């Protein structure tokens, strides 16, 4: 039996794919949750909030006896603070390996959410704990949520030059399990889907699959963020690990 792994975000979307794979690989897990949950075979739940800091989250106690941390939890705000709190607690606990899921373009695209992910990466790098960071493209389910919301409008804005490499969360989960099993490797090659798709084509494919019709209106993303997106700074066109799950297959399985 492998050593117990501490997992944040184990009850979320990516965690729902990753946790079963870890259990199948023989790992016992200690999963951080904001609300109380009943333990199951091989899975222990602890309650805490990483944003609460050292005194409010009981993280030091939760990390007792843990050698590996898999940090999957993320949020639109405060992810850098939560990650710093976790990394500092991991250093105090003598954790030997932090595996963190980040986002492609975190260090290149000047928008608030990606800057926060870059700050979270830096917090791990500066913690003194050996680490592995995997940057992933946007997950299929999050891409679907975005285009479904956009398609509610009678006329859908179509940002020129904006492209994505949507990736199946199951492929990302499988890669994370591989990284957990290996030694700390620093920043590893990104993982992306097999297709680079323009935002407009993502919307068109969704409305077609859903049996809808929408007009698209070209718009321009202003400023430095627009320049970065048009340059493809949110993409990894060379050197990425290319996952197998395609957007087309995902749509066929989830829409219609």
Image (cartoon, rainbow, N blue to C red):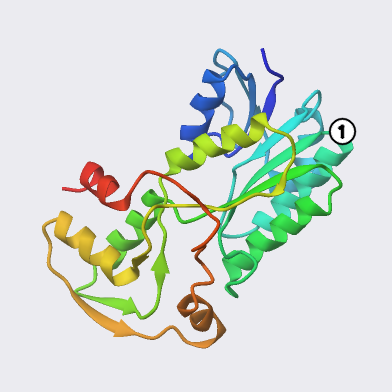
Quick one: 173 or 44, which is closer to the camera?
Answer: 173
In this view, 146 is above or below 231: above
Q: Is residue 34 left or right of residue 157?
A: right
Local crowd size for mark 1, using a 10 Å CA cut-off: few (<14), some (14–19), many (≥20)? some
Residue at image x 34%, y 69%?
A: 198
Q: Is residue 201 left or right of residue 190?
A: left
Residue at image x 28%, y 71%?
A: 200
In this view, 184 is above or below 152: above
Q: Is residue 226 left or right of residue 162?
A: right
The reply to whether residue 163 is in sight is: yes
In this view, 61 is above or below 81: above
Q: Is residue 176 left or right of residue 128?
A: left
Q: Give coordinates of residue 40: x percent, y percent.
A: 54, 15
Outermost residue toward the front? 238
Q: How many marks?
A: 1
Residue picked out by circle 1: 94
| SS assignment at label 1 | loop
Quick one: 5 or 180, which is closer to the camera?
Answer: 180
The reply to whether residue 151 is in sight is: no
């Amino acid at each position: 039996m492998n050593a117990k792994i501490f997992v944040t975000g184990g009850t979320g979307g990516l965690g729902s794919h990753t946790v079963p794979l870890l259990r199948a690989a023989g790992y016992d897990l200690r999963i951080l949750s904001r609300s109380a949950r009943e333990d199951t075979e091989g899975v222990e739940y602890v309650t805490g909030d990483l944003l609460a800091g050292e005194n409010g989250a009981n993280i030091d106690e939760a990390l007792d006896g843990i050698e590996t941390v898999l940090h999957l939890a993320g949020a639109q705000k405060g992810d850098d603070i939560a990650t710093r709190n976790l990394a500092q607690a991991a250093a105090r606990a003598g954790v030997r390996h932090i595996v963190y899921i980040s986002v492609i373009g975190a260090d290149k695209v000047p928008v608030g959410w990606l800057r926060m992910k870059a700050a979270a990466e830096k917090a791990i790098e500066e913690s003194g704990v050996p680490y592995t960071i995997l940057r992933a493209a946007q997950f299929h389910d999050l891409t679907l949520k975005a285009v479904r919301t956009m398609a509610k409008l009678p006329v859908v804005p179509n940002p020129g030059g904006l492209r994505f490499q949507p990736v199946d969360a199951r492929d990302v989960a499988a890669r994370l399990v591989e990284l957990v099993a290996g030694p700390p490797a620093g920043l590893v090659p990104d993982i992306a889907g097999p297709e680079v798709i323009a935002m407009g084509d993502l919307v068109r494919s969704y409305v077609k699959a859903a049996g809808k019709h929408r007009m698209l209106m070209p718009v321009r993303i202003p400023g430095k963020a627009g320049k970065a997106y048009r340059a493809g700074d949110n993409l990894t066109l060379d050197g990425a690990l290319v996952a197998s799950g395609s957007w087309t297959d995902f749509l066929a399985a989830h829409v219609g």
